Image (cartoon, rainbow, N blue to C red):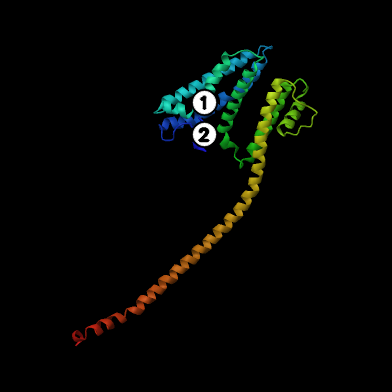
Amino acid sequence: MKESLRVAGLGGVDPHDDARAVQAWRWMQWVLIAFSVLAIPAFYFELAAASGLHLAGRALYACMFAGFAAVLLRMACLCHKPQRFLRRNGYDVLIAVASAASVARGIAPWSSVEWVLRIMFVGLVAVRIVVSLRSFFSPGRLWLLLLTAALVLASSGAGFYLLEPSVHTYAEGVWLAFESSATVGYGDMAPTTPASRVFAAFVVLLGYGLLSLVFASIAAMFVEQEERILRREMHRDIKALRGEIAALRKDVQTLGDETRAARAPVEPLKLAASHPDESR
């Protein structure tokens, strides 16, 4: 897994590098996650060109670029080989460059090529966030998964309420978010604007991931119970086997002692028989 992340450009700091760099990277990852989240509201602020929010979106992209650039430069200064660190983290360098390009490019409505590029950028950022948080969403942490699912559903409902004209209340936004994330598709409500459709695509992908993790966590609970029973039986069998081996060693040692004791009187007789003249 670590090797694949390194190849993908998310290698982090080499464990054999400077100890200060390794320690700093543990905290800098959280800083990068915080700046990565800015890409989501910036994307939708740029879509609202008519209301003037695109300026706020560009400001968020600028903050994102500044944050990524500052972190990468700081870590490069701490590492023994800055160029190697930047190569190991080419994914973050790409995000920094893309965020800078997002500040400089045009206002919505975007061309087809710019739509694709911006969606790809948001997808790259989403992957960056998921990879950074992968250890916190292990199947064994059901409570954290359920809490995350509730927060995602609540925020997605707010997103649909703001982006979709056919959604008139927050409750309808939550319902549309549930339909999208669970891929139910009752047909009573559907995204109609480009912004809400792009938002629905991310909600569907995120819903697939969260639902998979939740069901995997529930299944892991039952499997863990069976594994605990099997582990307990295995420990009991190992303990009994150790007792049998100890008893067998004791029996072998006792047999060896008896054998040596039985041979002891025989040795002088053999020596006397082999040297009759000396005995006379």
Residue drawn at x 42%, y 26% as measured from the top left: 83
- Which residue is more in the foreground, 229 or 134? 134
| Mark 1, residue position | 92
> Helix, strand, or loop for circle 2?
helix
Q: Depth check: 128 or 260 in front?
A: 128
Q: Residue furthest right?
A: 188
Residue 60 x, y percent position in the rendering: 59, 18
- Residue 85 visible here: yes
Which amino acid does the dot numbered 1 rest on?
Asp
Residue lying at the far bottom of the rendered structure: 280
* Percent of width and height locating residue 214: 66, 39
Q: Mark 2 — residue?
A: 5
Residue 36 horizontal side relative to residue 257, left or right: right
Q: Can you tell which quarter of the image residue 130 is in?
A: top right
Dividing the image into 4 quarters, which one contains the C terminus? bottom left
Residue 190 location, quadrant: top right
